[in-house]
Image: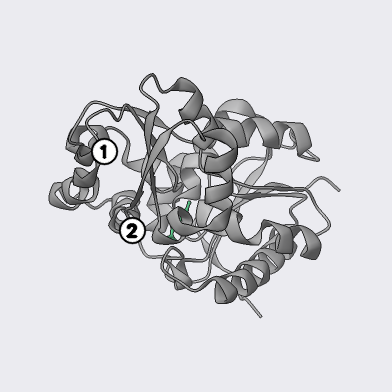
Amino acid sequence: MAGPILVFDSGVGGLSVVAALRRHLPDAALAYVCDNAMLPYGTRPDAWLVERIVAVCRAAVAQAGADTLVVACNTASTLALEGLREALSIPVVGTVPAIKPAAQQSRSGHIALLATSATVSRPYTQRLIDSFAPHCRVLRLAADPLVAEAEAWIRGGSLDVTVLRAALAPLAADPRLDTVILGCTHFPLLGSALAAAAPGDYDWVDSGDAIARRTAQVALSPDAWRGRGASLVTGSAVGLGDGFAPFGFAPPALLRVP
Ligand code: DGL
């Protein structure tokens, strides 16, 4: 039977991917799951994360009856895609930092990767840089505090501009920088506030559209729309009902992870 496409992230970041999926696949049934009890992922140890991500996704796929999984999290994808594909019998689409398009579109060849501490230091990320941006100068910038800003923003809070400015200030170290990769799915949710707080005028690149295009190729039931999708959380749902509604999801239910 046709099931929804399940979008997974540690927190609300996957909603930026949901927005791209809704644009590319308007007839798809989507469900959402976030492991917000363990947020943020970006500062946790790798071995622990792999086990946790597989356990959460396995439980969520079963509870949502999903037939496709989109891992809308760079921190999880650069680590656990292989484990997820081994553990699940449905198509799994991952998210990787948009290093290739950024390297292609940069005029100066100076680009920056803005992501979590985990993503900027992963071997997977290094391999992407070696393969797709060997001719570029790549500034890697860990910006974990932006995750909490996006979480607060979706819950109706206001942004702390001083946090945004402090996180982005190191970009000024390279005056020739022209392109910034948003390598954490939380960051596109902050939208124009990031551009306003940045120390220069940059092109911002994220992976949302590429993930949606890939999902359209592999999803088993891309046209099974049946109204608002389920949303699942492992931690507190406070403030998330209103935050999820504009993305087409019902108020969150609790996911129990064995
Ligand atoms: N949204 C996640 C990503 O794309 C990371 C957030 C976290 O640190 O949990 O990497």
Tell whether circle 2 marks a residue whose Cβ is less than 8 angstroms from ligand 1. Answer: yes
The residue under label 1 is: 194
Q: What kind of residue is marked 2?
A: Asp
Residue shown at 67% from the left, 68% from the top: 54
Count up the numbered dots. Answer: 2
Establish if 60 lies above or below 134: below
Q: Closer to the camera, 24 or 172?
A: 172
Residue shown at 71% from the left, 32% from the top: 216
Establish if 1 lies above or below 137: below
Q: Residue furthest bottom?
A: 258
Dividing the image into 4 quarters, which one contains the C terminus? bottom right
Q: Closer to the camera, 243 or 175?
A: 175
**Which image quadrant is residue 56 in?**
bottom right
Q: Position of residue 127 (x, y in %)?
A: 58, 47
Q: Quadrant of ligand 1?
A: bottom left
Residue 72 visible from this viewpoint:
no
The residue under label 2 is: 144
Q: Position of residue 126 (x, y in %)?
A: 53, 49
Q: Position of residue 30 (x, y in %)?
A: 63, 44
Q: What kind of residue is marked 1?
A: Leu
Report whether 230 appears left or right of 194: right
Q: Closer to the camera, 62 or 48?
A: 48
The answer for how far apart the CA atoms under marks 1 and 2 are is 14 Å
